[in-house]
Image (cartoon, helix red, strand yellow):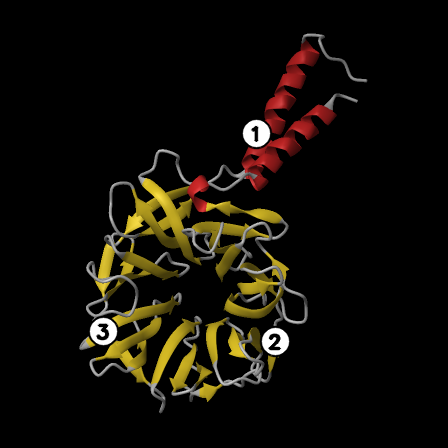
C-alpha cells in the first residue's frame, strides 16, 4: 500500500486544528465613552445605553439609548423620560426595557423599529421589561410595595403573571422561541431565591451549586439556561442549568462569576472576578474547561486595557460588552466579531491533494514504491 497513512494523519491534524483552535476576534468601539451595551441580535444590531458623563450608574437622569447598526446610530425617541434601561433586542429590531416617567415611576417599554410604546405599570407601582423573543413575546417584572411578580406579555395577547416558587418576589428575565421563560423567584425561605423555568403551564426550580440562591438570565431554543448560583464555600459562580438536571459550575476555580447570555450553539458569555472586590473580567465559558478571558482573544496591540463585562452573544458568535480604553476615562461599549477561519474542508482537501501529488512524483522518480 502507498503510504496514505501519513496523508490521513496530516489531514486529520490540519482538520482538527481548524475546527478546534482557540477563537480570535476583531474588536471595535460602539457609541461614545460612558456607554454600556445591553444586547445584540442575529443581524448584528446592538443596543447601547449612554450614561450621563457626570453621574455614574444606571437609572439616572438624561440617559440615552442607541440602536447601533454598523456605522448607523439611532437615538431612541424617549420623551419626558429619565434613566432608560434596555433589556433585549430581537431579530426584528424590537427592543424592550424600562424608563422612568417624570414623576419617578418606572414603566416597561417596547420599541417597534419606528416608535416607543409605553407599556405602563400593568396596574402596579412600576414595571420592567427584560426579555423578548422573535415572535414579540415580552417578559419582565411587575412590582408594587412589598412584592413583585414575573410576567409574560404575548404578542397581541394579554398580560399573564407567572407563579412564584413560594415567595413574594420574582422576575422573568428571558424567553425563547418556544415561549419558555426563565428568571428568579423567592422560595419562601428567609433570604432564599432560586432560578426557575416556566414551560407555559408550570414553574419548576432549577437548583443551586450548593449554596442557598441562584438566578437565571437567558435560555436558548435547545432549553439550555445560563445564570449564576451561590456555592457552599461562599461566593457565586456562573452556572449552566437544564430542567430536571443538576446545574453545572462553569467557573469552579474562580471566586465569583456570572453568565449573562447563551446563543443557539451553546456559546456562553459573562464575567469572572478573582475576588468580590476586584474588577470583573469578561469571559467566554465552556463546560469542563476554564473560562477564556476575552482580553486574551483580541489583538495584543489593541487600544483596550481591559474588557469588564460581556452582556450578549448572537448566533454568529459576535459578543458585546463593556471595557476600558487606554488613556480614556469611563467605560466603553465594545463589539467583538470572530475572525473568519479558513474553511476546514478546503484545507483538508488541499493537504490531501498536495501530499498525493508529492507521492506520485516520488513514485515516478523511484523514490517510493507500493508496498
The tag on residue 32 is none
Q: What is the distance, in whole Å, between disc 3 and disc 1 at their CAs? A: 59 Å
Q: Mark 2 points at which residue?
A: 205
The mark that comes first in sequence, 3 or 2, is 3
The mark that comes first in sequence, 3 or 1, is 3
Q: Of residues 93 and 220, which is closer to you in this image?
A: 220
Q: Quadrant of residue 45?
A: bottom left
Between tags 2 and 1, which lies in front? 2
Residue 55 falls left or right of residue 210 = left
Q: Give the percent coordinates (x, y) of residue 8.
A: 69, 30
Mark 1 element type = helix
Q: Give the percent coordinates (x, y) of residue 112.
A: 31, 74
Residue 326 falls left or right of residue 12 = left
Q: Mark 1 points at which residue?
A: 350
Q: What is the distance, in whole Å, between disc 3 and disc 2 at their CAs? A: 35 Å
Q: In which quarter of the image is residue 65?
A: bottom left
Mark 2 element type = strand
Q: Residue at left 50%, top 59%? A: 259
Q: What is the distance, in whole Å, between disc 2 and disc 1 at their CAs? A: 51 Å
Q: Residue at left 46%, top 77%? A: 171
Between tags 3 and 1, which lies in front? 3
Can residue 371 be spotted in the picture?
yes
Q: Mark 3 points at which residue?
A: 82
Spot the residue most to the right. 371
Q: Residue at left 24%, top 45%? A: 328
Dot 3, crowdedness within 10 Å: few (<14), some or many (≥20)?
A: many
Where is the C terminus found, in terms of image quarters?
A: top right
Mark 2 near mark 1, Cβ–Cβ under 8 Å? Answer: no
Amino acid at each position: 500500500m502507498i503510504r496514505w497513512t501519513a496523508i490521513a494523519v496530516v489531514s486529520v491534524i490540519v482538520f482538527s486544528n481548524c475546527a478546534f483552535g482557540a477563537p480570535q476576534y476583531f474588536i471595535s468601539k460602539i457609541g461614545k465613552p460612558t456607554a454600556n451595551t445591553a444586547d445584540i441580535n442575529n443581524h448584528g444590531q446592538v443596543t447601547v445605553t449612554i450614561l450621563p458623563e457626570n453621574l455614574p450608574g444606571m437609572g439616572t437622569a438624561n440617559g440615552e439609548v442607541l440602536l447601533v447598526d454598523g456605522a448607523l446610530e439611532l437615538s431612541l425617541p424617549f420623551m419626558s423620560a429619565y434613566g432608560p434601561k434596555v433589556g433585549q433586542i430581537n431579530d426584528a429590531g424590537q427592543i424592550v426595557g424600562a424608563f422612568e416617567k417624570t414623576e419617578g415611576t418606572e414603566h416597561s417599554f417596547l420599541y417597534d423599529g419606528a416608535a416607543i410604546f409605553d407599556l405602563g405599570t400593568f396596574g402596579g407601582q412600576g414595571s420592567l421589561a427584560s426579555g423578548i423573543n422573535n415572535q414579540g413575546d415580552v417578559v419582565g417584572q411587575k412590582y408594587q410595595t412589598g412584592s413583585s411578580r414575573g410576567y409574560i406579555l404575548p404578542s397581541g395577547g394579554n398580560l399573564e403573571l407567572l407563579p412564584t416558587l413560594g415567595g413574594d418576589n420574582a422576575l422573568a428575565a428571558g424567553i425563547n422561541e418556544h415561549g419558555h421563560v426563565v428568571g428568579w423567584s423567592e422560595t419562601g425561605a428567609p433570604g432564599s431565591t432560586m432560578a426557575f423555568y416556566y414551560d407555559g403551564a408550570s414553574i419548576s426550580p432549577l437548583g443551586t451549586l450548593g449554596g442557598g440562591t441562584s438566578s437565571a438570565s437567558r435560555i436558548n431554543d435547545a432549553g439550555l439556561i445560563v445564570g449564576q448560583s451561590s456555592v457552599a464555600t461562599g461566593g457565586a459562580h456562573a452556572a449552566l442549568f437544564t430542567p430536571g438536571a443538576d446545574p453545572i459550575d462553569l467557573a469552579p476555580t474562580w471566586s465569583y462569576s456570572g453568565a449573562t447570555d447563551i446563543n443557539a450553539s451553546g456559546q456562553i458569555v459573562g464575567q469572572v472576578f478573582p475576588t468580590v472586590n476586584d474588577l470583573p473580567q469578561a469571559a467566554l465559558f465552556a463546560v469542563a474547561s476554564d473560562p477564556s478571558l476575552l482580553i486574551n482573544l483580541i489583538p495584543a496591540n489593541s487600544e483596550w486595557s481591559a474588557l469588564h463585562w460581556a452582556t450578549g452573544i448572537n448566533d454568529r458568535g459576535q459578543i458585546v460588552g463593556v471595557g476600558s480604553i487606554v488613556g480614556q476615562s469611563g467605560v466603553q461599549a465594545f463589539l467583538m466579531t470572530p475572525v473568519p477561519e479558513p474553511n476546514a474542508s478546503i484545507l483538508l482537501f488541499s493537504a490531501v491533494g498536495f501530499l498525493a501529488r508529492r507521492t506520485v512524483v516520488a513514485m515516478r522518480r523511484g523514490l517510493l514504491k507500493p508496498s
